[in-house]
Amino acid sequence: MNELQGYEVATFPFPDLDLVGILLYHDFPSTIVYAEDKQSPIIIEWVDCADDRKTHRYLAYKSSIKDLTKYIYGNLSHYNLIKSAADGLIVSYDEANGRRDNMQIIPFSKIPLSYLPKKDVYFESDEEVDLNDVIDFFNIPVKKNYYSIIEKEPTFPPSEITNEKVAIERQLLSEISQKELLKVVARQENSEVINMHIKEGSKIGFGTADTYVLGRLLITIDDLYRETALDHEEGVDRDNLRSINSKRGQSLYPRISTRVVLAEAASYSVFIRPIETDETSTDNHDHSILQKIFSLFSSSGDKTDLSKSKEHFSSYVYKSYQEFLEVIKLSNVDLECNFYNPFKEESIDQEFEYDKAIRLLENIRYLTTTETEKISLNIQFKALNTNTGHYTLKLKDGKQLKGHFDDLLTSLIPSLNFTDRYDVTISRAKINSTGSKKLKFEDTIISCLQSKT
């Protein structure tokens, strides 16, 4: 382990800690959140271990709810989360067999670079474990000041809206319902249109909406449209579109993006259409993408129906749908989405609220499938962790595998060594998570005997 240049302390500065949850997990817990006096978050980061794998080194620091919130929602890098530690107080310590030793207060500038995340590394929700526990414990707020749009969309000329048209729409608003107004707007736009009507919420008033709530709803519904349109353009087995500003993104932009054409007070209501529509056709892909989205809305209410629809959408569509539902849940709003196709005179209605968003999220997670197989191997151990039960093993061809021991075998770990060979049986779980393009593998040793040969 690296030699540190800090100031030795006899006692740990954060003695009374309550475990809140594991925020990041890389083969073992690497970023853990505690609470001091049930208020301030204390974050402990695993950074190093000794060659014998028995002694581990950690950094501990006090953060703030504001910085933790900014980190969780992608507005603060992991590097700057550590750098912004309260009072600049960062404590390093070594731990073996549950005992802290070699405690030092270390200035941020003296922390080895190998102990710090890269400056452009941000929170990855795919690697979180107890994120909801952390959010709930600290009552993390959802405020517009904590968020921003990371990627700037390219600028396109807005559609022309005449004063006469605006006057007609505003007059109609006072005379007809939102659903009837939707039909009028769709006919005027000569396009399918959805009305996203935010009816209730603590951050919603008549004609007003917090920037974060409205902004995130608009961004996530546009993302959902974009991913569904990309499925149509390139198939469900397509690659991810990493940036709308890429050459590929620019060429597809009008066909895979939406535009707000009207916003009204009711409590807050927006009308959204695809940017590009072929006015000579009543059955082109733009006229079906919104319907596909509403079919996903409908099927997600039932696990069986949702399973049947899985082959029709890419993992990116499900991920963007999850993000849309997460905004509804975190913002605690009642949302009504209405669709109208003026060419076929078809209407579809769908309502969302906090409890329903939670149920739909659970249904989507239900799509995660796990297949298990057993593998018999002759191996040598390269690393063993008696605290966490994790291992790294080496095969005869030099390849390495990582995993953990079954709970019933953890007591066996101290008797193992790195020179003998062992016959092991591994239970390998192949996890196909909704919203993820990659298979996840989890290996568990369920049998381990010293090899006789």
Image (tube, rainbow, N blue to C red):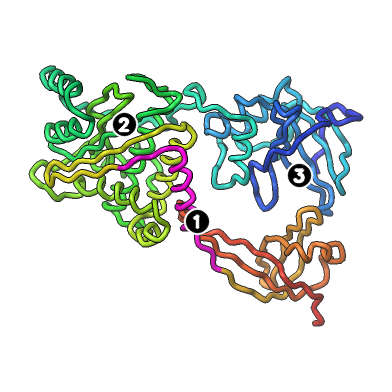
Q: Residues within 10 Å of mark 2 (few under 14, many from 20)?
A: many
Q: Of residues 106 and 247, which is closer to you in this image?
A: 106
Residue under circle 1? 433
Q: Which residue in the rendered view is the most extreme toward the bottom?
A: 453
Q: Is residue 413 above or below residue 60?
A: below
Q: Of residues 169 and 407, which is closer to you in this image?
A: 169
Q: Of residues 50 and 68, which is closer to you in this image?
A: 68
Query: Where is residue 109 shown, x and y percent of the image?
Result: 72, 26
Q: Quadrant of the N terminus?
A: top right
Q: Quadrant of the C terminus?
A: bottom right
Residue 132, by quadrant, is: top right
Query: Where is residue 61 shown, x and y percent of the image?
Result: 74, 30
Query: In the structure shown, which secondary structural element does the residue marked by tag 3 occupy?
Result: strand
Please state which amino acid type lies under the numbered disc 3.
Asp
Q: Which residue in the rendered view is the most extreme toward the right?
A: 10
Q: Which residues are magenta?
A: 350-371
Query: In the structure shown, which secondary structural element does the residue marked by tag 1 occupy?
Result: loop
Q: Is residue 315 above or below residue 63?
A: below
Question: What residue is drawn where x is 34% and y is 31%?
Answer: 153
The verdict on residue 143 being magenta is: no
Please state which amino acid type lies under the numbered disc 1.
Ser
Residue under circle 3? 48
Could you tell me if the residues under marks 3 and 2 are in contact, i.e. CB atoms within 8 Å?
A: no
Query: Where is residue 265 shown, x and y percent of the image?
Result: 29, 21
